[in-house]
Amino acid sequence: MATALVMESTGTLRESHGRGMNVMSEEYIFPADLPEIDRLNLQHNLWKRAMKGNCSVPADELDAVFAKQKEPAILDLGRGTGIWCKEMAEAYPEARVVGVDLVDSVPAGMPSNCTRGDITQGLSSFRNQFDLVHVRLVIVHIKGDAAKEAAIGQAIACLRPGGIIVISTYDESYASSSRQFLSPARDDEDNSNRSWCTRYLAEAFGRSGECVVGDFTQKCLVNNVAIDKKSIRSDSFYIPVGWDGGDGTYGGVTGEMSLRQTYALFETCKPSLISKGVPQKTIDEWERKAEEEIKDPRKRLFHVVRSIWGRKL
Ligand SMILES: C[S@@+](CC[C@H](N)C(=O)[O-])C[C@H]1O[C@@H](n2cnc3c(N)ncnc32)[C@H](O)[C@@H]1O
């Protein structure tokens, strides 16, 4: 059991004795401590740069949906540190913003139109109430495909007709400078077309290192009878790790943020690797190889973020 520091609504910290942030997952453990709060907030700011805003859904599409309601309503499912809810509540002061999570961590200074909902009773009390449901890096933590799809179904049920669900995640394979996904590096082989960064995440998450999370999410939206199939859209953001991306889309500052975020993610993964019985020496070796790969000018990497959205009929 990990002991974690949890940020309360006042911004003060208290000790909590839980398994960590991803209490739904038995596959891996993420800590819920101050470095993890910092990492999630850094990741939020990085994704915001990539998406040119808080949400990949175009602002005019959101505005059109919100304009139909006297009090638009936004639900952030698995709000984490609460930074996204806070910024959305500030951007849309006329909206009611509700953030729910299994872990009680909310930044200080939440606007009055932003509240914490109680997730412990399930999502049934939120049905048919929201114009935007935002689910970022949550579904991936739910164990098993059937449970993941059911969770997406429950999230869709929280929408009013015409409302938008947006699900964002990152692919667990890093991509080469030519945007080809790189499968996990193998011991004692030529890994020029594979990646130690992908290997590190694949070991921590106990998966094959395939870039399937976004594909799975898209399939769930397509399969859901409540979603207007014609409305489904997706976007991929290729974020350079430790370089400028080469085409002027992002630049060096984004590359540096992404580098810090990648190292912080590796740190976050360590409790999982340790719990799987990976010796510290092996973890250090994988980390060293991943860092060498990131610094290798012949092998520039992208971290790929995917966002999929659609409207309820
Ligand atoms: C990696 S964090 C992402 C947090 C936030 N969405 C963000 O993008 O910064 C995953 C969050 O999902 C929460 N979570 C996991 N399973 C959940 C569930 N079934 N219901 C609500 N929250 C959940 C965790 O407690 C954690 O805060």
Image (cartoon, grey):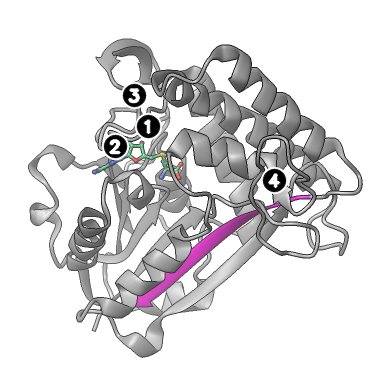
Q: Nearer the viewer, mark 3 or mark 4?
A: 4
Q: CA distance from mark 3 to mark 1?
A: 10 Å
Q: CA distance from mark 4 to mark 2?
A: 25 Å
Q: Residues within 10 Å of mark 3 (few under 14, many from 20)?
A: many
* Disc on the earlier residue, 3 or 4: 3
Furthest residue toward front: 188
Q: Which residue is mark 2?
A: 25
Q: Which residue is mark 4?
A: 195
For residue 20, the mark is 3
Q: What residue is shown at x 11% (from left), y 47% (from top)?
A: 122
Q: Nearer the viewer, mark 2 or mark 3?
A: 2
Q: Position of residue 108 (x, y in %)?
A: 42, 27
| Front-lying residue, 26 or 246 | 26
Q: What residue is shown at x 81% (from left), y 43% (from top)?
A: 253
Q: Is residue 52 visible?
A: no
Horizontal side, residue 310 vs residue 162: left or right: right
Circle 4: element type? strand
* Disc on the earlier residue, 3 or 1: 3
Circle 1: element type? loop
Q: Position of residue 152 (x, y in %)?
A: 26, 61
Horizontal side, residue 202 vs residue 155: left or right: right
Q: Which residue is mark 1?
A: 28
Furthest residue toward bottom: 230
Mark 3: amino acid: Gly
